[in-house]
Every structure is written in C-alpha cells, then in structure tokens.
Image (spheres, helix red, strand yellow):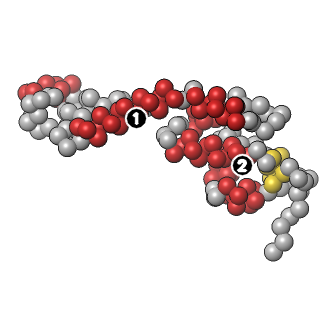
C-alpha cells in the first residue's frame, strides 16, 4: 500500500511509529499528555514535525530511567518550538535530572547490598534483625518498610 505523501518536514503518525519503534497508541497517548504535538491536515489527519522523533526518543529514554511523565512534559515544554532541539538543549535538560538519578542509584545500591539480610526493616524482619532493627523498634512506627524512601 503506498504511503501518503507529506511535506519534507512532516510525518504521519504511522511514519513516526515506524521510525521510532513506538506504537501508534503510545504516540496518541503522548500527544494527549502534551508530550508531543501534531498539526492537522484539511482532512483532519495528524502530521508531526521531524523533531518529534527526537522527542519520542527522549521520552522513552527518560521513562526507562524512571522519570515521571509529568517531569518529562515540564522538561519538553522548555525546549524551543521554533527549531529542532540541539545536543546542548538535550544536555541541559538531562543535567537537571542528574542529582535525582544519582540519589536513586545510591538507594538501589543500598537496597541491593541489604537485600539478602533485610528488606527495609519493619515488615519481614520478624523481630529477628539484631543489626538494623534490634527488638523490632521500627515495628512501632506501623506497617511497611521504614528505611526505604516513601512512595511518590
């Protein structure tokens, strides 16, 4: 089946899906969430600018490392709309997350190191962890793993 012809700088949703490896339904979700934008043709078909491919790649990479979609959207809103973002634009955005990612890495390393003996104290120690929760003192704070960061 022949593809619809578009201008040099515009792509159909199917073309973006094919080039990015992201499902059409995900692209529609990203658009509804304000992460990417399209224009409409006179017959109401979506058209995406070529920089959408970079934005989708950035969204996927950001999601992969656990950045919430709201944070990704706020970052993408800071990008210039009149031109394709440059390497410096992307570097500036990703640098703002470095501290958060470093903190997560530290938390994950601590969890990995303690995983064989403790699962955050307070839930699975069964009053037997004499090193990090003697006499199950954390159990008095209520249920759950008290040494892990709160769920966001």
The foreground one among 89 and 131 is: 89
Give how far across and how far down residue 39 sits, in percent.
83, 46
Give the residue at mark 1.
105
Give how far across and how far down residue 31 sits, in percent.
70, 45
Query: Residue sitting at 11 percent across and 38 percent down?
Result: 126
Query: Residue sitting at 35 percent across and 32 percent down?
Result: 107
Can residue 33 be seen from the camera position used here? yes
The foreground one among 40 and 111 is: 111
Query: Residue sitting at 63 percent across and 42 percent down?
Result: 58
Give how far across and how far down residue 133 sits, in percent.
14, 28
Going by the picture, which residue comes out furthest to the front?
Answer: 87
- In the picture provided, is 83 more to the left or to the right than 150? right
Going by the picture, which residue comes out furthest to the bottom?
Answer: 1
- Choose top left, top right, bottom left or bottom right for residue 91: top right
Are there few (<14), some (14-19), or many (20+) residues within 10 Å of tag 1? few
Q: Is residue 56 above or below residue 18?
A: above
Are there few (<14), some (14-19), or many (20+) residues within 10 Å of tag 2? many
- Choose top left, top right, bottom left or bottom right for residue 90: top right
- Please, what secondary structure does the residue beneath circle 2 have? helix
Query: Residue sitting at 61 percent across and 43 percent down?
Result: 59
Give the residue at mark 2.
53
Q: Is residue 38 above or below residue 131?
A: below
Give how far across and how far down residue 85 sits, in percent.
74, 36
Q: Quadrant of the N terminus?
A: bottom right
- Choose top left, top right, bottom left or bottom right for residue 145: top left
* Labels 2 and 1 touching (C-beta < 8 A): no
Mark 1 or mark 2, which is nearer the start of the sequence? 2
Distance from label 2 to label 1 (Cα)?
Answer: 28 Å
């Amino acid at each position: 089946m022949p593809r619809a012809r578009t201008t040099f700088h515009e792509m159909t949703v199917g073309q973006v899906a094919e080039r990015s490896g992201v499902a059409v339904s995900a692209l529609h979700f990203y658009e509804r969430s304000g992460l990417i934008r399209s224009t409409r043709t006179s017959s109401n078909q979506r058209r995406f600018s070529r920089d959408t491919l970079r934005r989708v790649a950035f969204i996927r990479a950001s999601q992969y490392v656990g950045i919430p979609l709201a944070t990704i959207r706020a970052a993408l809103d800071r990008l210039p709309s009149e031109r394709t973002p440059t390497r410096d634009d992307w570097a500036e955005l990703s640098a703002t997350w470095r501290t958060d990612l470093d903190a997560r890495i530290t938390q994950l390393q601590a969890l990995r190191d303690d995983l064989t003996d403790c699962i955050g104290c307070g839930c699975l120690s069964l009053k037997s962890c004499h090193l990090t929760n003697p006499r199950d003192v954390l159990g008095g704070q209520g249920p759950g793993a008290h040494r892990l960061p709160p769920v966001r």
